[in-house]
Image (cartoon, grey):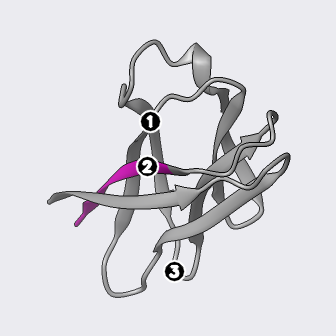
Amino acid sequence: MLRTIDKDVTRTANGEKLEEIIQGRSDIKRRLVRATFEQVNATYFRVYVDQDKIVDIASENNALDYQWLEIDRDLENGEVVKVGFYDEIGASAAQHVAVQIEEI
């Protein structure tokens, strides 16, 4: 089953702000399928699985708000997925993020 998980992340002025959005479990096989975000100039959208940065894209390189970025990564038991932004311009504001996961 495909699920969408939404979260608002408040960007930190001139820094990186990440929030946990999902965790791998032993009783359910989970796969991170894709992610999307609200576009804002001078920010980088980032997705981490534990300490591995698997997405790092300049927001303005995503042509449209909420254009899906394909990821396709299985999550092992206990792995934590964090999403967020690195802000270069010094503005703190909430931005919407969504990920889609598949649960088998």
Question: Which label is found at residue 77?
Answer: 3
Circles 1 and 2 in contact, beta carbons < 8 Å: yes
Instruction: Please name the residue shown 39% across and 17% down the image.
Output: 64
Which residue is labeled 2 in the image? 97
Tell me the quarter of the picture where residue 60 sits.
top right
Which comes sooner in the sequence, label 3 or label 1?
1
**Residue type for callout 2:** Val
Foreground mark, 3 or 1, reads 1
Q: Quarter of the image containing the C terminus?
A: bottom left
Q: Residues within 10 Å of mark 1 (few under 14, many from 20)?
A: some
Which comes sooner in the sequence, label 1 or label 2?
1
Instruction: Tell me the SS state at disc 3.
Output: loop
Instruction: Tell me the SS state at disc 2.
Output: strand
Q: Is residue 97 magenta?
A: yes
Give how far across and how far down residue 18 sits, in percent: 66, 61
Distance CA(mark 3)–CA(mark 1)? 29 Å
- Can see residue 56? no
- Magenta highlight range: 95-104
Question: Which label is found at residue 38?
Answer: 1
Foreground mark, 2 or 3, reads 2
Circles 2 and 3 in contact, beta carbons < 8 Å: no
Distance CA(mark 2)–CA(mark 3)? 23 Å
Q: Nearer the viewer, residue 104 or 54?
A: 54
Q: Residues within 10 Å of mark 3 (few under 14, many from 20)?
A: some
Instruction: Tell me the SS state at disc 1.
Output: loop
